[in-house]
Image (cartoon, helix red, strand yellow):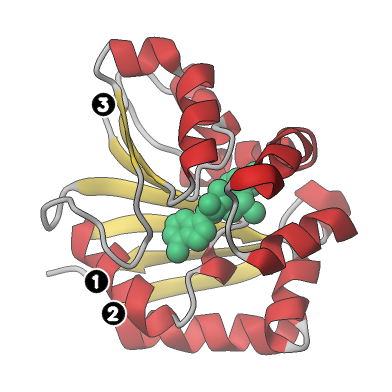
Amino acid sequence: MEVLFYVTKIKSFDGIFGRIAAPIMVRKNREAEIEANEILGATQGARLLVLGFGPGVGLQDLFRRTQNVKVVGLDPSQIMMEIAAKRNACEIEAGRLRLIQATAETISEPEDCFDGAVAVNTIQLCEPFENSLPEIGRVLKPNAKLVTITHDWAAAKHAGSPEIWKARLDSALVAAGFSAIDIFNGKSEKGKAIVVTARWRAK
Ligand SMILES: C[S@@+](CC[C@H](N)C(=O)[O-])C[C@H]1O[C@@H](n2cnc3c(N)ncnc32)[C@H](O)[C@@H]1O
């Protein structure tokens, strides 16, 4: 966990740190990725956005659980692009998955085009939220669901305590135009993962 924290603190998941972090994330974060997708509950044919896909385990699970989904993944790391592309090669080939090397602050997709979005252990890296949440909202369809899951220890490292971080994210979501915000402890990470869900404003 501490290794992951130091890698997270570096903020770049590229180079040697990306190579070290990737297999750790595959092992340690799989449960949270699966839980986020369960909570998202995408329906057949949905268009989905995955922010910070890392080694691509969550992407793989999305295709396993729901038929005919179309997914766009964003991650700034070249190493994660390579690893996730390898893991999801068939879906890319079939035109169901597009990976873009970018951050949540600049999403090169049109307005109102996704039915849902997922960010696992990533939203804490998208601060200041004032720059990322409105951009995420811009590409969501009205009432689309955003699901984030975050290590409680990462939230604490970013804000001093998980409670302060949750309050910060809650008010940033409201300011950006999200509603129906729900914050609770997930099942993953022995019940310590922080789940935050929200809906983009209806038009
Ligand atoms: C801690 S890893 C989590 C990866 C994966 N979701 C998991 O839980 O294993 C965070 C990922 O977010 C990416 N990332 C960092 N800053 C980002 C940003 N501003 N927008 C989108 N992704 C970002 C990193 O490159 C990295 O792959």
CB of mark 3 near ligand 1 (< 8 Å): no
Q: Position of residue 66 (x, y in %)?
A: 42, 23
Q: Which of marks 2 and 3 precedes in the sequence?
A: 3
Q: Where is residue 187 in the image (x, y as percent from the top left)?
A: 77, 49
Q: Position of residue 128 (x, y in %)?
A: 45, 82
Q: In terms of image quadrants, where is residue 38?
A: top right
Residue 90 shows which numbered tag? none
**Residue at 53 percent of width and 80 percent of height:** 169
Q: What element carries label 3?
A: loop
Question: Gap between marks 1 and 2, in whole Å?
Answer: 6 Å
Q: Name the residue under label 2.
A: 177
Q: What element carries label 2?
A: loop
Give the residue type at disc 3.
Gly
* Residue 56 falls left or right of residue 41: right
Q: Which of marks 3 and 1 precedes in the sequence?
A: 3
Q: Name the residue under label 1.
A: 201
Give the residue type at disc 2.
Gly
Pointer 1 and pointer 2: residues touching (CB < 8 Å)? yes
Q: Name the residue under label 3.
A: 45
Give the residue type at disc 1.
Arg
Q: Can see residue 38?
A: yes
